[in-house]
Amino acid sequence: MKSKFLVASAAMVAAAGLLMSSGALASAEVPVEVRVVTFRGEILAQRSVRTGTTTVETSRRATCLGGKPTDDRKRVPGATALGALVDLSRRASRLDPLLLSGAFDFGIGLCGVGSAVATGKQWWALKVNGKLATTGGDTTKLGRGDRVLWYLDRSYEKPMPDELRLSAADSPGRSALRVKVRALTSEGKSSPAGGAKVYLGGRQVGTTDRSGRVSVRVPTGGNGPEALVARLPGHIPSNRVEVENGS
């Protein structure tokens, strides 16, 4: 239990933002995907951003980690999970404001993202490419194409739910999509997610079989692309995959 708490404390390290660096530092920016989800099943945001050196603000109101947080400004060098969340928060109003604590030496702790604020034993877990981070958000370095997940978990005392990962490919003739859903543990181990319900634009369009697969009919007409998402009780909702309407 002690090690679990330490991982939770370290991985809560994250975000909030102000100014991105410019000039020579801009060349160090890398493209990454950032997703923010809560234990209530809310997908607060998912977007690709370019991230690099960032300046963040901590707040005396960020009390979720204990200690004595203060209002301060800190520089976070390089492309990090912290900086990526900051950059996303500038583009997604639901993530503003970020509530950060600088009360501890281990890094900048994330307490809140918009209205989703950790209370009690709740904590913001950080996963990169399917694996739970063992360092804080401001020291978790990112590379080109990394996938970042910030997840508001129910309790640092309990195992973290598996994360769903959805992929889709065209079927011959593009009359349907071949959808595949897998479950990723905190260690990044992958297995088929059977019984996952797949939604398109909020409408359930199928359920995966034991191999984690399902064929989804491509809709015709419509006003633009819609998002495919997979959900399964006890799991973190999947990433969203946009699907263009058929002709």
Image (spheres, rainbow, N blue to C red):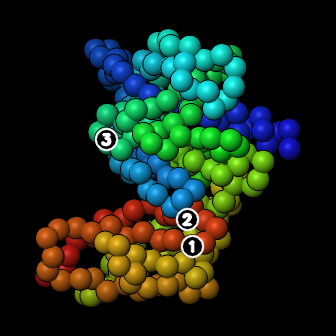
242 shown above or below 153? below
Taking the image as shown, residue 68 lies to the left or right of residue 180, namely right
Q: Residues within 10 Å of mark 1 (few under 14, many from 20)?
A: many
Q: Secondary structure at mark 1?
A: loop
At 53% from the left and 53% from the top, the residue drawn is 38
* Quarter location, residue 133: top right
Q: Quadrant of the C terminus?
A: bottom left
- Residue 178 is situated, as x and y percent measured from the top left of the image, at 41, 81
Q: Secondary structure at mark 3?
A: helix
Tell me which residue sits at (63%, 32%) in the image.
Answer: 64
177 to the left or right of 219: right
Residue that numbered label 1 is attached to = 232
Tag 2 and tag 1, C-beta contact below 8 Å: yes
The amino acid type found where label 2 is placed reads Leu
78 or 100, which is in the foreground?
A: 100
Q: Earlier in the sequence, mark 3 or mark 1?
A: 3
What amino acid is found at the position of numbered circle 1 in the picture?
Leu
Relative to the observer, which residue lies in front, 62 or 193? 62
Element type where label 2 sits in the image = strand
Residue 93 disc label: 3
Task: Indicate the position of residue 208 as horizontal and vertical percent values.
Answer: 52, 83
Q: Nearer the viewer, mark 2 or mark 1?
A: 1
**Is residue 50 something one can see in this rendering?**
no
Q: Crowding near pointer 2: few (<14 within 10 Å), some, many (20+)?
A: many
Residue at label 2? Answer: 164
Please state the horizontal and vertical placement of residue 48, each as a whole percent of the image.
Answer: 35, 46
Q: Note whether 131 is above or below 52 in the view shown.
A: below
> Which mark is first along the chain, 1 or 2?
2
Spatial CA distance of label 3 from label 2 is 25 Å
**Picture coordinates of residue 119 (x, y %)?**
62, 41
